[in-house]
Amino acid sequence: MPENLHTTLRDYQKTGLNWLNFLFEFKFSGILADDMGLGKTLQTLTHLSCLKTQKRLKKPVLVVVPTSLIANWKNEVKKFTPNLNLLSLYGGVERFEAFEKIAEADILLTSYALIYRDIDKFTEYHFSYIILDEAQKIKNPKTKMFVAIKSLKSDFRLALSGTPIENHLGELWSIFSFLMPGFFTQSNCF
């Protein structure tokens, strides 16, 4: 547990944190699918804080969230893991200016609405992690947003979702395709 964590994790959150650490150690991507309100964001931030404390966070982490969660992520980083340097790539003119500061950041925060618009800038980078909050947003593999997100380069990928399947099992294919590019080649074989 990083000593600069400004909260105490519950036992189930510690289990989730241990699982995230396990995935990292063995170079796996994964999905954290705890129910809504159980602290997926906190577990993820604690994991990233541990990596930074251990000097194992070598490149920025890209976090993609619904627009409605931008403020929540900013608040949780500030409140629980202030050792993580967050750069918000959201808004108008300030968003374009922020791209010049990417090298200084631990976490880059953007929205699903902007990821496709800014894809040319994001494809210039190789991230430590790409983290999708509310990952069910990419359930349709035919969208430009899915194609854009899947084209990004990273060492690890993490999907956060309390509802990875909303209608049918086929929706899970898109999330797995993001997590393990090339492993599940066709959705009809899933």
Image: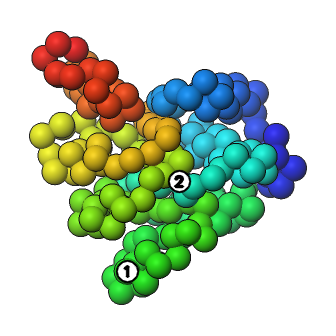
User: Is 30 rendered above or below residue 2?
Assistant: above
Q: Which of marks 2 and 1 is nearer the N terminus?
A: 2
In the image, taking residue 139 as reference, residue 176 lies left or right, namely right
Residue pictured at 45% horizontal, 53% vertical: 126
Q: Mark 1 points at which residue?
A: 96
Where's residue 128, x and y in %? 53, 48
- Does residue 76 appear in the picture of this structure? yes
In the rendered image, residue 165, in percent from the top left (x then y), is placed at 31, 26
Q: Distance between the residues labelled 2 and 1?
A: 18 Å
The coloring applied to the image is rainbow
Q: Is residue 178 left or right of residue 168?
A: right
Residue 99 pos. (x, y %): 43, 75
The answer to the question of whether label 2 and label 1 lie on touching residues, with beta carbons closer than 8 A, is: no
Please tell me how crowded label 1 is: few (under 14), some (14-19), or many (20+) other residues with Cα within 10 Å: some
Q: Mark 1: which secondary structure?
A: helix
118, 33: nearer the viewer:
118
Position above or below: 23 against 107: above
Residues 108 and 182: in front is 182
Q: In the displayed image of the protein, which residue is found farthest to the top?
A: 189
Q: Name the residue under label 2.
A: 61
| Mark 2 residue type | Val
Instruction: Give the percent coordinates (x, y) of residue 147.
Output: 21, 45
Q: In this view, does 30 lie to the left or right of 187?
A: right
Specify the quadrant that holds the N terminus.
top right
Identified at 74% across, 45% down, the residue is 50
Residue at the limit of the structure toward the right, as seen here: 3
Under mark 1, the amino acid is Phe
- Residue 69 shows in this picture: no
Q: How crowded is mark 2: few (under 14 residues within 10 Å), some or many (20 or more)?
A: many
Report the residue at 37% width, 28% height from top: 180
The vertical placement of 61 against 170, above or below, is below
